[in-house]
Image (cartoon, rainbow, N blue to C red):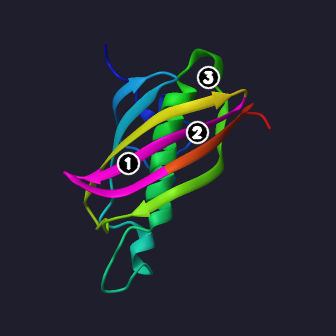
Amino acid sequence: MSLPAPEEILPHRHPFLLVDEVVELEPGQSARARWTVPEDAPFFEGHFPGHPVTPGVLIIESLAQTGGLAVLSSPGNAGKLALFAGIEKARFRRQVLPGETLDLEMTLTRQRGPIGEGTGTARVGDQVAVQATLRFAIVEGDQ
């Protein structure tokens, strides 16, 4: 079975689509994806001049988008939006540099009605860069 492109599930588009490839997908359960941080991303001009580092908030967003793949690939959620409802237990363990590839994993741990939660890890190779628990809310796409 071939995997969908991120754009087939997520509403995000360039320049804010922070997932390049879906690696594994269990609708409503989990997702694995990859994002190669562009070496020429404009945010590196100011974060930080002479020492470019990927902003942690963008790594968290890439994890959220990976979780969105799992949530929005469920038949009942197709065409909806997954919005942030909370970020907890975020731990930044390693800097992510221009051109590095993040391996992203999100596992949905609970959902009650439109509110849910998942745990995720972003890695560069075998090194953990970020770990976090994220909460989300599912809303209709036309709101």
In the image, what residue type sits under mark 1?
A: Thr
Of residues 95 and 88, the one drawn nearer to the viewer in this rendering: 88
Question: Which numbered tag is attached to residue 117?
Answer: 2
Residue 32, quarter of the rendered image: top left
Mark 2 surroundings: few (<14), some (14-19) or many (≥20) residues within 10 A: many
Asked if residue 15 can be seen in this view, the reply is no
**Residue that numbered label 1 is attached to:** 121
Looking at the rendered structure, the secondary structure element under dot 3 is loop
The alpha-carbon separation of the residues under discs 3 and 1 comes to 24 Å
In the image, what residue type sits under mark 2?
A: Glu
Of residues 20 and 125, the one drawn nearer to the viewer in this rendering: 125
Residue 142, quarter of the rendered image: top right
Q: Which residues are magenta?
A: 114-132
Query: Measuring 64% from the left and 26% from the top, which residue is drawn there?
Result: 79
Q: Is residue 7 magenta?
A: no
Dominant SS in magenta: strand
Q: In the image as oriented, which residue stretches furthest toward the left?
A: 126
**Residue that numbered label 3 is attached to:** 78
Picture layout, residue 101 above or below residue 93 = above
Instruction: Tell me where residue 136 appears, x and y as whole percent.
Output: 64, 41
Instruction: Tell me where residue 50 appears, x and y as whole percent.
Output: 31, 86
Tag 1 or tag 3, which sits nearer the N-term? Answer: 3
- Quarter of the figure that contains the N terminus: top left
Picture layout, residue 26 above or below residue 52 = above
Is there a contact, CB below 8 Å, between mark 3 and mark 1? no
Q: Relative to 93, is 27 on the left or the right?
A: right
